[in-house]
Image (tube, rainbow, N blue to C red):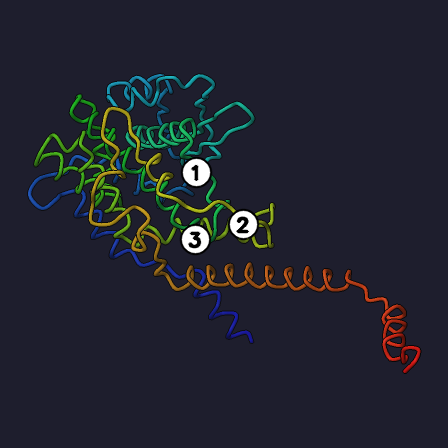
Amino acid sequence: MGKDFDRESESITKKPETRRFKDTSRRLRSGAEKPLKHRASLDWRLDQRSVCDKGGAEADIVSLEELKSVILKSRTGEALLEGNNGLSVVYDQQSPASQYYTRGEQRIITLNPLRPKGDLINLLARELRRDWQHRHGALVNPLVYEPDEAILINRAQSADVLMVGVKIAWELKLAGEPEAWDFLTGSPLVDVTRTFEIKAQADFRTLNNGEASRAAYDKFFEDSRTKLHDKRIIHQMLLDESGYMKTREKGPKLSIDLFKRLGEIPHGRNYLAMKAKHAPNDLCYSTVEDRSNANFLWFIKFERSFLEKELQMVRDSVKLSAEVVDFGKWSDKTKRARQPEPGQ
């Protein structure tokens, strides 16, 4: 048993593999042809490895007014900031990145102040997009729908805010504010960023006709990043205090109108209403390929179906038990029917 304990301790304290990290950092620092501009993103990723080190210098906190002034240089960002009376943007170090939530009539955005400036601009742009969706009726709760539909809605909302963040970062880059774009090009979202950039550079009209936005939106679903979003919404299904796992009345059916509201953007064509290879509610956008998530999703659907059948059986049994048969009257009727009539 002592050997097993020692072996377990060794596995816990074993030094992590750093070869791939070194290769990535070397590639990001030097680049294939010339030094890259996304050092801010690389520095942030490097800082995560030394988060427990002592004696580090405090990060320079960018003021919220400075972030808003940068966002206003983007045409899309300026439109998202308009008419947001009642919206509060605050710093919260307990927030891992950013969050948007409502409290009564209040709408609140929280940001982690210790993140780089370029990342903060991207996070603020995404949360402003969520606020815009909320005010236009597109930020629906996925848990109101059936499990498969909830997966699709959650993915679509995540892809939309990411696409809008990329669009704002591109507009800021053209306006002489490259921090947000440089951070994205050094992040795991570089494939989405690159897809938008290729479309925008090939034809500037794609910025307003929806083609660049739709290309970036579709690119979101091509990577394994949907695994993380699926895992979060599945955990919400399992832990929902309102009883998502329990039988309840059928919720609303998912319609294309929801995606049309989701695809509305200021100063541009609705990118989800345009003709494309796949409709926004196509099966390719909602297929869960990760085995772990697929198993949990199957369990959720089975449990909801089982409880619904069980409740239906209880309702049927109660209905039958309510129909009480008066055997006394039935017996009297039978006897009278068998008695011969007078004169027979």
Residue closer to the observer: 154 or 16: 154
Along the horizontal axis of the image, is 247 left or right of 66?
A: right
Work out whether residue 331 or residue 294 is closer to the camera in this orientation and state it: 331
Q: What residue is disc 3 on? A: 231
**Residue at 38% across / 17% down in the picture?**
83
Residue at the extreme front:
343
1 or 3: mark nearer the eye = 3
The percent coordinates of residue 174 (x first, y second) are: 15, 25
Residue at image x 56%, y 76%? Answer: 1
Q: Which residue is mark 2?
A: 250
Which residue does the image show at 56% across and 61% down from the upper left?
303
Which element type, helix, strand or loop, lies under badge 3? helix
- Front position in the image: 39 or 10: 39
Judge whether 141 appears above or below 176 on screen: below
Residue 123 in percent (x, y) is at: 35, 32
The quarter holding residue 12 reads bottom left
Type of amino acid at the residue the image marks with label 1: Pro
Rendered location of residue 72, percent (x, y): 28, 18
Q: Are marks 3 and 2 in contact (CB under 8 Å)?
A: no
| Above or below 249: residue 54 | above
What residue lies at 29% left-to-right and 23% top-to-bottom?
A: 77
Instruction: Give, as a three-letter code, the residue at label 2.
Output: Lys
**How many C-alpha atoms fall within 10 Å of the one at disc 1: few (<14), some, or many (≥20)?**
few
Check disc 2: other Cα within 10 Å, few if <14, some if 14-19, many if 20+: few
Distance between the Cα atoms at labels 3 and 2?
A: 23 Å
Q: Is residue 89 above or below residue 46?
A: above
Front label number (3 vs 2): 2
Identify the residue position indicated by label 1 in the image: 96
Find residue 334 and report its image quarter: bottom right
| Mark 3 residue type | Lys
Residue positioned most to the right: 342
The mark that comes first in sequence, 1 or 2, is 1
